[in-house]
Image (cartoon, helix red, strand yellow):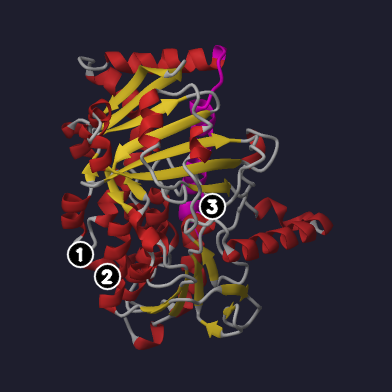
Amino acid sequence: MASEDNLKIIVVGAGIAGLTSAYLLRKAGHDVTVLEKNGNPCELDISRDGGLRLPPNAARLLEDLPGTEKLLQEKATKCAGMHLFQCENKSSELVGKLEFKDDIMHDLGSDFYFIPHRDLHSHLYDLCKKVGVQLRHHFEVKQVRNDKDTNPLVISEGGEHVVGDIVIGADGKNSIVRDMLLVEEDDTAENDFLDDTHTADRPAALPMKMFTGLTFKYFRATTSISVSLIESDPELSELTNSAHWKVWMGNGISVMGARYGPDLYILDLIYGTPRCPEDTDDDWLSGKPVQSVLKHLDDFDTRVKKILQLASTSHWNIQTVHDLPQYVSKHDNVVAIGDGRGNAIGISGTHNTIARAAAFEDAFTLGRLFSHKTSIRSRKSLLLNGYQNIRQERARNIELVDMSTAVLMGSHPGPEREARNNGLRKTLELEDADDDTLAKAWAPHVAQFDYDARDAVDEWWMTWARPATFRNALADFHHE
């Protein structure tokens, strides 16, 4: 890439999405600085907690990064499938399952993994350092300014200013960058109310209120337990010996459990509105007593409660799925990714309840768009709007699937729950099913798992990046 095409890119947030995008953009030749409010991850004791689910659509992308395939083999657990249980009267009944058979996963191009957050985060952090990403810690962002005809400006709590050609908001569920985009959206809506000549060109808002009548919120508690502690109890050891993802469904609440690598077992509790009076939105670096989780599980399998009692702390947060139609600022120089863009409940990811697969897709989409070899600076607006067009429908589909799944898994006793369980029980008979039956059972999962962010960029490029000189530039992408 010619030096005049190098962009100065500021990434707000050194989480998974921020580090992945920073690495890819630096590899593409851009000058990248990451601003992180916390210290070096090696300094943070909390890095021992939390895990990530990596379905095939995320694992395929990650396996392109140096050393990641080896990391998954050594530090991750390969998920064998999903088992769903109905909990009632302190016991549980297996009502559904989905087996991740080798031939199916081979066709999808990768397996489904569980990995400790600390291991993947440390790997991405090291990759960024090796390629020359500037990592600045203890830089708490107060404001992002995005004025017309000037480059975006990031201002710290201490008053320091950092200027870049592009600012990427990967700053988590309480994103300052997303707040800025929401303010822009409100201003646009107000102007459109006065002059509706442009409303037809704006994307329809995602119906986040469809389930609750309010902006959709959900509540999550995460606990991490040492495998050795669990295996000391014969009644519990079956859970850690299994490579299946367990989902226990109760009254308005679901609990998910799995082994994340050799040494970690993680339980996640999820429930939607209405909230309990004592529910709080805590930072991941804080912890609450495990009793805060146990009181929600009176009707659950006693094994779930026994595992929870082995944990030292739980991590609670409240997440809002925001209605954010535009991921790119009106001046085409600020963009939101990962849970800075939107909080999905995370059928495919944990740790701050982020759908990590979508976060990786965001990062790889940006990285591939901006890895073009010529005229990046003059095409910046085109490429950022390409990100908007590529990610919008996909991200909204993930959010809607996650919200509807959270509601369905927490169904209370009644006809809806019975219909759900009767439908799930059909999956118990798939062992010797024919190909057509298996295809129907797998169809919704294939739609999620078979998506490839790189292919989506290439398709967009061929469709929209015209004239012909733009199309010819596709051959330059990563020399593939």
Task: Report the residue marked by disc 3.
Answer: 342
Is mark 2 in CB contact (under 8 Å) with mark 1?
Answer: yes
Q: Is residue 461 visible?
A: no
Q: Nearer the viewer, residue 73 or 306?
A: 306
**Seen in the image, is 236 located left or right of residue 283?**
left
Residue 346 in picture, x, y percent from top left: 44, 43
- Labels 3 and 2: the sequence-earlier one: 2
Q: Secondary structure at mark 1?
A: loop
Q: At x 52% / y 27%, what residue is drawn? A: 410
Q: Earlier in the sequence, mark 2 or mark 1?
A: 1
Residue 51 position, x and y percent, is 35, 49
Residue 381 is left or right of residue 47, and the answer is right
Magenta segment range? 388-415
Secondary structure at badge 3 equals: loop
Residue at the spot 25% in from the left edge and 76% down from the top edge:
130
Identify the amino acid type marked 3: Gly
**In the rendered view of the protein, which quadrant contains the C terminus?**
bottom left
Which residue is the site of mark 1? 66
Label 3 – label 1 distance at C-alpha: 28 Å
- What kind of element bears circle 2? helix
Could you tell me which quadrant the N terminus lies in?
bottom left
Q: Report the magenta stretch's main SS.
A: helix
Residue carrying label 2: 127
Vertical arrangement, residue 106 with respect to residue 127, above or below: above
